[in-house]
């Protein structure tokens, strides 16, 4: 084991001279059982320090093991546990005793990633009806920084279900929740709902911990999720909030003197984030699906962090004041989810989107003082009210088939001639209610 003293300390980075045969990703040990990870080698060795700053200086002896920074992992023993950003248990239970799993381990080759399939039910009827999420993809959820999405995230983790085929029953997923930089009240809230999740693993990094931990937490969560999926688990990885990762990376690169990219963004954010996003996959037994939550100033899609994330992921779901932005939501691979849903799903999601868009146009005209008298316009207004109350804004838990039925019921206000649906689907699923009947 090699022992050296730092040449420079600019936390969270500690620099040393050249250290022969040292490898990136290996562990550095500081006094007091604190650790760091080697991030660069050569003429200058750099270590990211992961502990508290008290008493750390150029006099501090540091030991280099040249072993990968790792944590004990057991596929069965990890279920139900809560660990910190480095995989160390923080739930008061005994530590895991098994083979070490590197925090920065090898990533599955993306070419081994097969086309998504199956259906994940989020528990939000409007989202499940319009933009169903297939297994094995990564998808972005966007929110404003000043708004909380804790309830929607918790509701998804509790209610998420999956099925590979239409005839399969909906079954619970194994949820891996990765928290980065969350305030204490949010941490307590998510811990309170954990007993309601059938199978879960929590990787927690709070706002009171060093920001550098936000760079480790998603790596640890991805390693756990990937290992569980490879062992046959159907995993949903929920990462919240990727903005903290972005800010921590920008802080570290600034300390290193790396010139920033566009809009002062960390120049290597895309490559660093891709190591997280590209972990999603599906195989015959086992899958890993990622929902990445990111705070976006003013929901500006052109902001560099979210723009790169949108490019890397397979859809984006904007939320506004904790509510789904229905028309702006997009799941690019939703077509693969239709194979595990009803025959009418792909036609219904298209017509319900067009009908709600038309209804909002009519509603806007009415707000400008125009008198709405045409029966077709009034029908769309009635549809919108029913759709919003039973599908879009409901807090009820309904499965995806019930969500589709509610959409069809709301569409019953609209004459079939105004709906662009194949005749055989229209005849089987659409039941028109003329205005007179609706008022009786």
Image: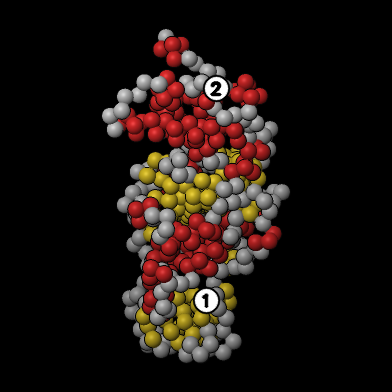
Q: Is residue 47 left or right of residue 365?
A: right
- Residue toward you, 178 or 30: 178
Q: Quadrant of residue 422?
A: top right
Tell me the number on the disc at residue 27: 1
| Secondary-structure class at tag 2 | helix
Q: Quadrant of residue 104?
A: bottom right
How many marks overall? 2
Tell me the number on the disc at residue 416: 2
- Residue toward you, 65 or 117: 117
Quadrant placement of the N terminus: bottom right
- Looking at the picture, does residue 410 appear above or below residue 15? above
- Badge 2 crowding class, 10 Å Cα cut-off, few under 14, some 14 to 19, many 20 or more, is some
The residue located at (53%, 68%) in the rendering is 271
The residue located at (38%, 70%) in the rendering is 264
- Residue toward you, 97 or 405: 405
> Please, which colouring scheme is shown?
secondary structure
x and y percentages locating residue 379 in the rendered image: 43, 22
| Secondary-structure class at tag 1 | strand
- Residue toward you, 268 or 202: 268
């Amino acid at each position: 084991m090699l022992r050296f003293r730092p040449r420079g300390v600019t936390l969270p980075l500690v620099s040393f001279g050249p250290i022969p045969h040292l490898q990136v990703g290996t562990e550095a040990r500081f006094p007091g059982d604190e650790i760091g990870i080697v991030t660069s080698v050569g003429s200058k060795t750099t270590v990211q320090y992961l502990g508290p700053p008290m008493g750390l200086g150029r006099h501090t002896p540091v030991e280099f093991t040249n072993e990968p920074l790792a944590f004990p992992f057991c596929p069965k023993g990890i279920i139900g546990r809560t660990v910190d950003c480095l995989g160390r248990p923080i739930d008061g239970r005994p530590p895991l005793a098994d083979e070490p799993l590197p925090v920065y381990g090898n990533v599955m080759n993306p070419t081994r990633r097969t086309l998504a399939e199956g259906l994940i039910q989020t528990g939000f009827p409007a989202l499940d009806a319009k933009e169903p999420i297939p297994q094995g993809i990564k998808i972005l959820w966007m929110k404003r920084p000043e708004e909380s999405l804790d309830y929607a995230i918790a509701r998804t983790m509790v209610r998420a279900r999956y099925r590979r085929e239409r005839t399969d029953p909906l079954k619970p997923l194994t949820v891996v929740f990765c928290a980065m930089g969350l305030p204490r009240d949010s941490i307590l809230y998510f811990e309170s709902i954990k007993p309601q999740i059938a199978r879960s693993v929590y990787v927690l990094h709070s706002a009171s911990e060093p920001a550098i931990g936000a760079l480790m937490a998603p790596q640890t969560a991805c390693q756990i999720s990937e290992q569980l999926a490879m062992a046959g688990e159907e995993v949903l990885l929920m990462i919240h909030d990727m903005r903290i990762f972005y800010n921590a990376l920008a802080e570290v690169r600034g300390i290193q003197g790396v010139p920033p990219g566009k809009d002062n963004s960390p120049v290597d954010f895309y490559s660093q984030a891709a190591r997280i996003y590209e972990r999603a996959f599906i195989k015959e037994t086992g899958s890993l699906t990622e929902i990445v939550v990111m705070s976006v100033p003013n929901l500006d899609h052109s902001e560099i962090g979210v723009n790169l994330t949108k490019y890397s992921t397979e859809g984006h779901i904007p939320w506004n004041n904790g509510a789904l932005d229905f028309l702006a939501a997009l799941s690019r691979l939703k077509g693969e989810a239709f194979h595990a849903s009803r025959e009418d799903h792909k036609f219904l999601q298209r017509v319900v989107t067009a009908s709600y868009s038309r209804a909002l146009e009519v509603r806007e005209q009415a707000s400008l003082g125009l008198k709405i008298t045409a029966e077709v316009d009034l029908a769309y207004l009635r549809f919108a009210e029913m759709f919003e109350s039973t599908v879009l804004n409901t807090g009820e838990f309904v499965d995806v088939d019930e969500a589709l039925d509610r959409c069809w019921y709301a569409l019953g206000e609209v004459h079939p001639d105004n709906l662009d649906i194949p005749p055989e689907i229209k005849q089987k699923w659409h039941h028109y209610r003329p205005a007179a009947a609706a008022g009786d």
